[in-house]
Each structure stands twice: as structure tokens, then as C-alpha cells.
Amino acid sequence: MKREGLAMELEQRNFRADPLKLKRLRIAASLSAQEFQKVSGLNKDTARKLLRGEPVFLNTLSQAVREAFNIDNPLEVLHPEELADLGVQTEVPSPGHVLEWEIGEYLSGWQQTSNGLQFQLLRLRHRFLEGRLARGKCYELRHMSTEEQSRVEAYLRRHVEVCEQIGGHPNIAVNLTAALVGGLWWVLDRWEDGETLGERLRGGAISEYELRFIM
């Protein structure tokens, strides 16, 4: 009876979702805020509150993430402060997980940029959205001082900013998110099958004819 009473109490409580996590999920699912509202089955006001990180009933939150993202456990999207209040450990990430993504394959060993940053390339699978893949670029920052990290911050953010400025272009990456996780800077782009530009250039110069389609 105590367990049933606790479950009922939780269902009647209002909880906040993590708005950043919901935004990442929406981007990965290619859902606008309006499309999320329709898919989740919520009315407009409730959907707006949920996406802004304002409190809603737990069963409302559960319904929304189940319908929109196929997530059965609402703990996956609760705000960190809500998780802390419930006594859920939030500091230690699961091995092989980056945000809502799971590392599927390492595409390269550690490489180095011209300014000395170490990085590697990976393919990741979304943990909740079936068939969603991402190309990850992981930068190693754990050996760098705070001053050194500040020095390269503009470089690390450049890719995301360029993708946003150019917008939808068939030959420009679609950035999903970028985040600092455990001392590693992750840039996640939508996965595209086929030959990369680097692989193509290793086969020789690009002809004027090809450039018409690339540009």
C-alpha cells in the first residue's frame, strides 16, 4: 500500500523536464515545437510549458515523451534538479553514452588539428529514436588548463556557428548539438552515408563539373 501511495503521490506532483534535453531530442527527431505538440497529443499551452522546463503533471510528461520519442521512463528527461530531489545519481554517465547517444563505432584513432587539438571521429546511435545515426567529433580537453580551453573555445564553436549561418544546404552538415561531457568536447552532426570530402580529395582534384553540384 505504501508503494502504491507513493506512486499516486508522484503522479499528482508537477515535474520539470530538462529543456535542453528536449531540444536535442526534437532536433534528432526532426520535430519543430509545433510538430512536437501534435505528436505528443498535448494542447499548445501544456506543450509550451513542457518545452520551456516549467512544471507539468508527471503523467502528462510521460505521455509526451512516450508518444514523441518512444521513451518509456520519464526519468530520462527530468531536469537535473528534479533528479537530485528524487535521489537519482546524475554525475556519472553510462559507459559508451554521450548525452542521448550511444557510441556505435570508432571511425578513426586520435588525430591532431593544425592548432594542436586532439580529436577522433565516431558513429553514434540514438538511444531512443530507432534508426537515427550521428557523426561525432570528439575533442580531448582533459589535459588542458582552463586558460588553454578558453583560448580554443572560438575554434570549438566555429563548426556549429557556420552550420547555423549557412542553414539547409545539401553539402553542408546538419549539426544536432555540441556539448562538453566529462572533459571532452563533442560535436554531433546528422549522419550522411557515402564518401566524405576528404576521401574524395584523396582521389584527385575536383573537376569544374563536380563543383557545380557541390556548391
Image: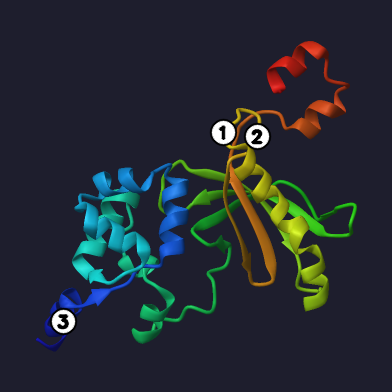
- Residue at x-position 46% and y-position 62%: 20
User: x%, y% of residue 85?
Assistant: 36, 86
- In this view, the residue in front, 195 or 105, is 195
- How far apart marks 3 and 2 lie (CA) works out to 49 Å
Q: Please say which color scheme the image uses.
A: rainbow
What's under tag 3, amino acid-wise? Answer: Glu
Q: Which residue is mark 1?
A: 168
User: Mark on residue 9?
Assistant: 3
- Confirm or deny contact between disc 1 and disc 3 (CB under 8 A): no
What's under tag 2, amino acid-wise? Answer: Ile
**Does residue 37 appear to the left or right of 128 in the view shown?**
left
- Confirm or deny contact between disc 1 and disc 2 (CB under 8 A): yes
From this view, report whether residue 1 is shown above or below residue 164: below
Indicate the quadrant where residue 21 lies. Answer: bottom left
User: x%, y% of residue 202?
Assistant: 86, 29
Marked residue nearer the N-terminal end (3 or 2): 3
